[in-house]
Image (spheres, rainbow, N blue to C red):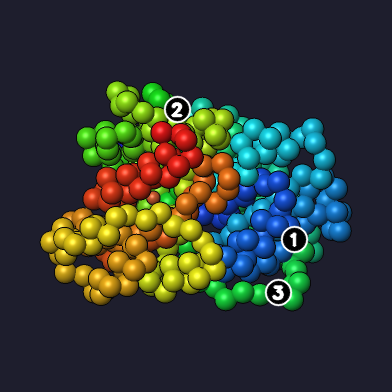
Amino acid sequence: METMSAVSSQTAITDFLPINGTDFIEFYVGNAKQASYFYRTAFGFQLIAYAGPETGVRDRASYVLQQGKIRLILTTPMHPGNEISAHIEKHGDGVKVLALWVDDAEKSWQETTSRGAKSHTEPTIHKDEYGEVKIASIHTYGDTIHTFVERKNYSGIFLPGYIAIDDGYTTEDVGLLYVDHCVGNVELGKMDEWVKFYEDVMGFKLLLTFDDQDISTEYSALMSKVVSNGNGYIKFPINEPAEGKKAKSQIDEYLEFYHGPGVQHIAVATHDIIATVSALKSRGVQFLRVPDTYYDDLLERVGAIDEDIAPLRELGILVDRDEEGYLLQLFTKPVEDRPTLFFEIIQRKGATSFGKGNFKALFESIEREQALRGNL
Ligand code: FE2
């Protein structure tokens, strides 16, 4: 009996969905050849692998880009009338897959589907001369899916079916290291449902809550809750629009143009945000800008920091502090014509939070952009 209770208490604290990190993020795009050029040239990613008609894949072309531990796949359909083209028609370019690197894809799929996840793809083994990868997928908010990738028996460049590629074009990387967090926007009233999904179905824990008191400006309000997996490597903030404001919130604008819930931003980490943002700007990446007055009382708000204020002010980099340290961050403008997905560049210096102190200045900046689009 003692053994049994020891086992069951052990089971109770065991993470039923251990995750090693983000495996890849796959975008469905209208023209992957051109999108890959954008992410290589502007963001400093390298093309490492490819699958398409030349490799025997008839219905799509996929370009795999890498920088640090970040892997992006850009996939475009060859013809209409399939899941990829339907996704692009509805959403524009956007994130389809947030893939999670696991040691056991079949168990990950079973643990989550047995707790209520809707299966997208049952566990499937993909093989080539470099070994095998086991893959399974479940649905999350909107048309977005999570793919579990088990690659411990694989030594190839990416996944079976992809070939290593070098087209002779390389760009200097900009110091992007890994995915820090990925944020989803969901409809009014749905945030708690999706938080519960991540808690019950995926074993994540609620890390932080922001209400409309924290995140409110004259026009815009939103609510946000952050869930994180057992080891903290995966952090998914979930936003919903807040009610009672006189104009359309940035989340409403996203939902209107994405035509439903989806990934709002991908935050990528750097060890030197001044160098990273300088490089990105010089290559034409557009960032949100807060008023210059933000910097007048910056040190009074956040205390002493290692960086000089001058380059932060020049580049428009934001700073926030929590109990554990501080962070520097900056947000791009949307990277498509639709006001949907954008990127965050983040450098953590101890802080584990998400820049709550910057929300007001930031959202006012977003609203100026919304007004220019006629969406406020
Ligand atoms: Fe973020």
Residue count near mark 1 (Cα–Cα under 10 Å), binned few <14, some 14–19, many ≥20? many
Q: Residue 298: name its quadrant.
A: bottom left
Q: Any atom of ligand 1 within 8 Å of the CB at mark 2?
A: no
Q: Residue 346: name its quadrant.
A: bottom left
Q: Horizontal and vertical percent for residue 342?
A: 49, 50
Residue 288 tag number: none
Q: Horizontal and vertical percent for residue 195?
A: 39, 33
Q: Which type of secondary structure does the marked residue at label 2 adopt?
A: loop
Residue count near mark 3 (Cα–Cα under 10 Å), binned few <14, some 14–19, many ≥20? few
Q: CA distance from mark 1 to mark 2?
A: 35 Å
Q: Is residue 197 visible?
A: no
Q: Horizontal and vertical percent for residue 233?
A: 41, 55
Give the side of residue 333 with respect to residue 1, left or right: right
Residue 50 tag number: 1
Q: Which residue is mark 2?
A: 187
Q: Residue at x 22, y 35 (%)?
A: 213
Is label 1 or label 2 in front?
A: 2
Q: Is residue 190 visible?
A: yes
Mark 1 / mark 3, whichever is N-terminal: 1
Residue 169 tag number: 3
Q: Are marks 1 and 2 in contact (CB under 8 Å)?
A: no
Q: Residue lying at the far left in this picture: please name it.
A: 300
Q: Amino acid at mark 3?
A: Tyr
Q: Any atom of ligand 1 within 8 Å of the CB at mark 3?
A: no
Q: Are marks 1 and 3 in contact (CB under 8 Å)?
A: no
Q: Amino acid at mark 1?
A: Tyr
Q: Residue at x 31, y 33 (%)?
A: 219
